[in-house]
Image (cartoon, rainbow, N blue to C red):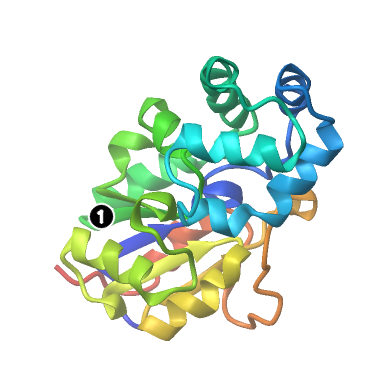
Amino acid sequence: MPAYRAVVFDFFGTLTRSVQRGPQHADIARALGTDPDILVGVLDRTFRARACGRYGSAEATLRWVIEQAGGDPRPSVIQAAMPARVDALRADTQLRPDAVTALTAIRHRGMRTALISDCTHELPAFLPGLPVAPLLDAQIYSVELGVCKPDPEIYLAACAALDVAPHDCLYVGDGGSHELTGAAAVGMTPVRLAAPDLANHLVFDADTNFAGRTVRSLTEVIRLIDSVPVLV
């Protein structure tokens, strides 16, 4: 196994526990004049397009979603809903108990860290307030870059931000968005996080055929790193 200079993480389902949409999403749907089940259907089938920023700003994207769901897209209504939308996503997000300690341990070993997330506009809005934020040397968001995993560009953007080559990177993810095979295709070493809670995780385009190394916790990633020499 090669040595690594950096560890690149997925966010939802990796640095966080499994994600499911909480009740605040239904409240937003009703406030915007649409049925919650219809709204969820629109969100599900348009995730990749929204995560690539196809519909513009956060406000424009929410307006488009509400139009598709048959709701009220008046500018004043959309504007009022924006903070609630960020709060709803933040409420769905619970960091893993070992996320901070794992990131801290990686950095203490002289390695760099990065985040690559297929996400909509809300994550860049609330991640800076999470305790993992200062432990990440780079944050690559699909909605800002305009491409989603497994496009090589999103992995290479993380490498450029960290000033490392892909083969110097360990990539850790739960396997959504075919992220593990995508990481391998650019030369990273992918590792699937298969934590028990992920059985109920909201995931799109799962990497079901990945047959590489698996860990059960972020703490196991540290043990994996310690089993090989670190390049400095």
- On the image, the x and y values in percent for residue 36 come to 82, 31
The amino acid on which the numbered mark 1 sits, given as a three-letter code, is: Arg
Q: Residue at x 54, y 15 (%)?
A: 76
- On the image, the x and y values in percent for residue 73 come to 63, 27
18 sits left or right of 222 in the view? right
Q: Quadrant of the C terminus?
A: bottom left
User: Is 153 drawn above or below residue 195 in the view shown?
Assistant: below
User: Is 107 drawn above or below residue 184 in the view shown?
Assistant: above
- On the image, the x and y values in percent for residue 192 come to 58, 67
Tell me, yes or no, if residue 129 can be seen here: yes
Q: Residue furthest front?
A: 74
Considering depth in this image, is 147 or 9 the residue closer to the camera? Answer: 147
Q: Residue at x 63, y 26 (%)?
A: 88
Q: Quadrant of the N terminus?
A: bottom left
Give the residue number, with chain letter if any, for mark 1.
109
Considering depth in this image, is 103 or 32 the residue closer to the camera? Answer: 32
User: Is 45 drawn above or below residue 179 in the view shown?
Assistant: above
Residue 155, picture quadrant: bottom left
Tell me, yes or no, if residue 197 can be seen here: no
